[in-house]
Image (tube, rainbow, N blue to C red):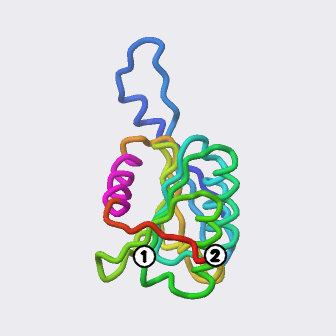
Amino acid sequence: MREHLFIGALMVTLVLPAGVTWATPSFDVGFSPEGAAQQRVIHLLAEAQTSIRLMGYSFTSPDVVRALMAARRRGVDVRVGVDEKGNRSKASLAAMNRVVNAGIPLRTHDCYPLLHDKMIVTDGQNLQVGSFNFTRRARANSENVLVVRDVPALAQIYLAHWQSRWDEGADWTSSY
């Protein structure tokens, strides 16, 4: 199920100087196990042009790893932060090693009982939030994803939160 909502009414209420245009914010929703949640995540990563900031509790998804690596190859500045305790499995360690070996900085976080955020900020203006963990298993769970595009003010709030957790994290070093 794909739903797009546009907030044109908001733009009408803004007073813009002549010649100034802004992108119209849009929202995209996806659910799993129907498959749309992961599609939204992968699509957002594929659209990124300058930066990706991902933070998640559990990290094992080969599809997300491949999308992050592809973004890095396109020249996108990619950084990943994950919960330390939630990523001790072989699958998590393999995903983390692949990301770091591709030149993507990754930090683990253990300052709180859980780092349970699940979010992506791209290009400083797009945002993905929801219950969807970046795991292979999440595709089969009942999960949700909300993607908000072209809302820099909201994305910056999440980016500040991401940065605070990044600053508290520890650099992950590949085991191979």
Is residue 129 something one can see in this rendering? no
Residue 162 placed where, x, y %?
Answer: 38, 58
Span shown in magenta = 154-166
**What count of labels does the image hold?**
2
* Three-letter amino acid code of the residue under disc 1: Asp
Residue under the point 61% across and 87% down = 90
Is residue 163 something one can see in this rendering? yes
Determine the secondary structure under disc 2: loop
Residue under the point 69% across and 72% down = 62
Residue 171 placed where, x, y %?
Answer: 44, 66
Q: Is residue 155 magenta?
A: yes
The tag on residue 140 is: none
> Please, which residue is most extreme toward the bottom here?
89
Q: Which residue is mark 1?
A: 83
Q: Nearer the viewer, residue 109 or 4?
A: 109
Q: Earlier in the sequence, mark 1 or mark 2?
A: 1
Location of residue 143 by image quarter = bottom right
Determine the secondary structure under disc 1: strand
> Please, which residue is most extreme toward the front here?
176
64 sits left or right of 158 in the view: right
Q: Which residue is mark 2?
A: 176
